Amino acid sequence: MSAASADPEIRLHPRLDAALVARVYRASGRVHVPDFLAPTSAARIHRALEQETPWQAVLFDGREHRELPAGLPGAEREALEAACAAAAARGFSYRYANFRIYESRQDGLHMGHFLMRVLEFLNSPDLIALMRRITGDEAIGYTDAQATRYRAGDFLTRHDDDVAGKNRRAAYVLGFTPDWVTDWGGLLAFPDRYGHVAEAFGPSFNSLNLFRVPMPHAVTQVASFAAAPRYSITGWFRSLPASA
């Protein structure tokens, strides 16, 4: 039997209460759902993220998205990271590592990677129907995805995901970090109009954080003393283009 055939089927947790999730989401536009997947599914995804994923360091330098090659000279890396920090002090910026699942699939790359199975699950008719039921948004037609890894110093400053032409209806973050501690940072934070944090969700293992687009949010910086990376799969439930 091959390793691929031995992998567990990705399933929802059998005790997922979709009606309760829908009530919370529709009341506030966001919801944290613990125990979203079956335990064997979550454990297999965590292994794929921790051991099998070719991570790419990325940041926003104040002007554009940049990918940092592994062999980038130290002085050049330091200059880009300084520009990233300066942009963050003024407004929007980010620094983390990612693996672009959806784009890789479109380009026919990494097709044997287990995370392609996750993308298939996120686009299955049953999962799309579940998201329509939870959000009340019948326009949801498909899901994109990327894997992210935040380590010490990584962050994503305040933004709202509302990009013209992207047709984003709801954003999601699936957490796959065992035993994350709040003091380590990496929280999905929702600021209010006064600049206070109205609510924040931790990246707890096997959780779904779901929220309406647009909604201001940020990922707080991961602390220097964080003892593990923050792993997640994130993206948007999107509507199909009008011409589709």
Image (cartoon, rainbow, N blue to C red):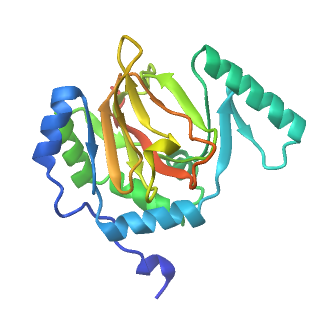
- Rendered image quadrant of residue 210: top left
- Rendered image quadrant of residue 11: bottom left
211 relative position to 135: left or right = right
Give coordinates of residue 109: x percent, y percent.
60, 56
In this rendered view, identify the residue nearer to me: 9 or 182.
Answer: 182
For the C terminus, the image quarter is top left
Q: Residue, x 63% and y 18% (percent of image)?
A: 89
Q: Residue, x 24% and y 32% (percent of image)?
A: 139
150 relative position to 27: left or right = right
Q: Give the residue at the far bottom of this rendering.
A: 1
Q: Residue, x 32% and y 67% (percent of image)?
A: 39
Is residue 1 visible to the viewer in this orientation of the structure?
A: yes
Give coordinates of residue 220: x percent, y percent.
51, 33
183 relative position to 89: left or right = left
- Rendered image quadrant of residue 156: top right
In this rendered view, identify the residue nearer to me: 31 or 52.
Answer: 31
Q: Residue, x 56% and y 52% (percent of image)?
A: 229
Give coordinates of residue 92: x percent, y percent.
57, 20
Q: Is 26 rendered above or below residue 73?
A: above
Is residue 61 visible to the viewer in this orientation of the structure?
A: no
Q: Is 6 rendered above or below residue 169?
A: below
In this rendered view, identify the residue nearer to me: 87 or 48.
Answer: 87
